[in-house]
Every structure is written in C-alpha cells, then in structure tokens.
Amino acid sequence: MPQDANTLPPIGLFDVRAQQALIRPEIDRRIAAVLDSGHFVQGPEVEELEKALAAFAGVGHCVGVSSGTDALQIAMMAEGIGRGDAVFLPAFTYTATAEVPLVLGATPVFVDVDPKTFNIDIEDLKRRIALVKAEGRLRPRAVVGVDLFGLPADWPAIEAICAEEGMFALDDAAQAFGGALNGKRLGGWAGAAALSFYPTKTLGCYGDGGALLTDDAAKAELYRSLRTHGEGKTRYEVMRTGMNGRLDTIQAAILLCKLPLMEQELAARTRIAGWYNERLAGKVQIPVSPEGAESAFGLYSILLADEAQRARVQEACKARGVPTAVYYPLPLHHQPAYRESHAGAIRQAPPLPVSESLCKSILALPMHPYLDEAQAARVAEAVITAL
Ligand SMILES: *Cc1c(COP(=O)(O)O)cnc(C)c1O
C-alpha cells in the first residue's frame, strides 16, 4: 500500500552505499596509501588492478583507462578507424557506443536489435553490411556488439561475420563485466572488450574509470601507448597520436577493494533476477537468457505492453517508493546529434522497428546486489498492481 512506503526502508534503483559499508575501512586504508605515496598517476595500484581484472576475466591483458568511452575510443584508434569507415552498432544502446566512431570521423551504421535479448540482431547486421558494400561509399571496418543490461551479445555469430568480412569485433561490455557466454567470461570474446567503472556499473569506482581487455599482446601494448599520448619506449618519444586516457591510481585502489566482492555480488544479482522472474513471468516480458549466456544483470529491464501501460506502472511504483528508469527513451538514430549521420550512412536504410518500439515499452526495475527478497517482492507487487 502506498502509505506503507514511508515506513519501509527505501529501495534504490542502484545502491553504492550498502557495499561501501562492508569495505569502508579497507577503502580508507588503500586511499591513504596512495596519498602517502604521492603516486597519483600510473601508480603501482593500476598495474595490480590490471593483473587482477585479467585474471578475473580469464584474458591475457588488461589496460586501465579513464572511462568506458575512452576504452572504446582507444580500441578504435588502435584499428586506425576514421574517415570513410563504417562501424556497425545497435541503435538501442547508450550514446557512448555511437559517439566514439563519430568523434574519430567514422560513420556509425545503426543496426536493429533482437526483441527478446535487446542485443544486436545478427540477420539485420548481415543485411546492413551488404548494403554498405553495395553502395561502396564506406568501408565496413568494425562491429561493436553491446552486452546490453549485462546479457552477452551473440559473440560466436558476430566473430564469424567479422572474420569473414575482415572487420574488427569490439565488445562494449560496459554494462556486463562478470557476464559469461558458453563458460567464457566477457572480456575473452571479440578482439577486445571495453569496460566501464562508472559508479553504478557491475564493478564501479568512485568517479570515472574503464579498462580494455584483450588476448592480443601487441594490441595491449598499443592501447598502453595510446592512453598516454602515443608514447614510445621512453616518455618523450611520441610514436603516434594518442590521448590522455589513463586510469587514476586512487580509482584503481578503490576497485582493488571492490573486486573481491564481485563473485558474491554477481551471484546476488542472479538470485534477485530470479525473485523478479518468479513473480513477473507471464505478466510482463522478463529478461531472457539464451542457451549458454549468463547475464551480469547490470540492469533488470522488463517490457510492458505499450507506452501507456509503462506510464501507469511507473506511477504506481513511484507511489510505493519504488524507483524505476527508462533505458533508453530514444533510439540513437532519432537523437538530434546522430540523425544527419544516420541519414547519410545508408541511402535507402531499412527501418529499425524493434529499437523504436523497445524505447516505448522498456522499464528498468531496481537492481543491485544488496536487495533482499522482501524488497524484490515489493517491487514486483508494485508492477503487478498497475498492469
Ligand atoms: C556506461 C556505458 C558506456 C560508457 O562508459 P563511461 O565509463 O560512462 O564512459 C559505454 N557503453 C555502454 C553500453 C554503457 O552503458
């Protein structure tokens, strides 16, 4: 009942405090150690974290960078992606995925997504690659698969297409660190994977941060150079145009305190998704997990019948003290910043009906590892009463 919401503990869409309470002394200790060392940029904590993340994901190399967006940019710069290049990516994702190719002078080609997984639609990807090739104005260079809401994209299919077409496969795993496909953690799929440590991601720091994971040693070296102004073997040898894209030592120290919680937090996210699934299955469209895919549940999003029903559900949740959010209210090809580029990418571009319709009916429910079953039940009940 709405009036009960005032007496029950508040539910957060995310919660960065419950976790902090568990490890605060360790965080204080590690931050103090950085302050004492004075090694604020490229301190030893950065390398310690890179080793720990590579081990966690089961990949050869990890390069800490300043954000998930910069991770995507460094990966694309390493491929020499720029003017005249087509970068295929889903129309239903966060803006950063599309922004990076545009910043580099390349053209994003928006691809529709699967109505069940919300990840890039393989048939539509093939169709749009064929269209770009037939028009002959842009060179197909890369596919950015996004593991939306934590669910791994269809990496075997994306990798096969990229291998056949001579394109680079890049995993935007910003929402999905900890997720796995066919027993292999994200980070080990595609040519490289970009992680974000934005505070509300599955592994978040207390500011901005990111990383690139790859099994290719030469690429990892290139990423290290690019994140530090394109430096060579010595600091004042500039080999290539790079950027200032380093991960702060303090953020690395914080992530080192959080990483040991990751396995139990992933298990908690899966458990909470199960509590939601039990109560919501058959009433709304719940997240699917294709054979072999383990979502990291960065977010838990349901699909309502239409915009009106979503508005009713949001209203009812709000009245019961249950926060909700819409990721994403607009497909990228409708964003003012990308409309013109989209219109020029493929002249007779097929429509993107799934991306458009998801934006009208998707709804994210509270998801963080410190929700208990009573809270999950409260959330589900708030949704159900408004259907
Ligand atoms: C968060 C996010 C990014 C960007 O990460 P930042 O660290 O905020 O730069 C990129 N892609 C997706 C899909 C994201 O969710």
Image (cartoon, helix red, strand yellow):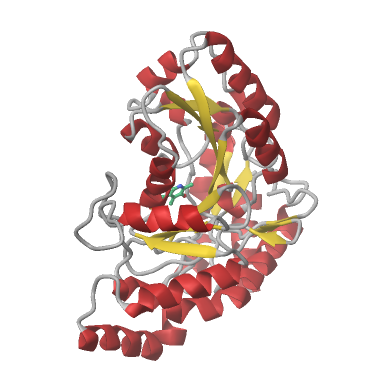
Q: Is residue 41 visible?
A: yes
Quarter of the figure with the N terminus = bottom right
Question: Relative to 50, does residue 238 appear above or below in the rendering?
Answer: above
| Residue 102 horizontal side relative to residue 126, left or right | left
Q: Which residue, as the protein is rendered here, is positioned at the far right?
A: 291
Residue at 51 percent of width and 75 percent of height: 52
Residue at 73% x, 46% y is 283
**What x and y, as percent, mark residue 80?**
40, 37
Q: Nearer the viewer, residue 225 or 37?
A: 225
Q: Position of residue 212 (x, y in %)?
A: 46, 57
- Above or below, 324 relative to 61: above
Q: Residue 72 versus residue 378: which sits nearer the camera? A: 72
- Is residue 305 at all visible to an observer of this figure? no
Q: Residue at x 45, y 17 (%)?
A: 345
Which residue lies at the image location 20% right of the left edge and 82% below the top edge? 38
Relative to 314, is 14 above or below?
below
If the image is split into quadrants, where does the C terminus sit? top right
- Give left or right: position of 188 versus 212: right
**Where in the figure is residue 326, as x and y percent of width and height?**
48, 44
Quarter of the image where one finds residue 46: bottom left
Q: Position of residue 131 (x, y in %)?
A: 59, 14
Q: In this view of the protein, which residue sits in the foreground, 362 or 380?
A: 362
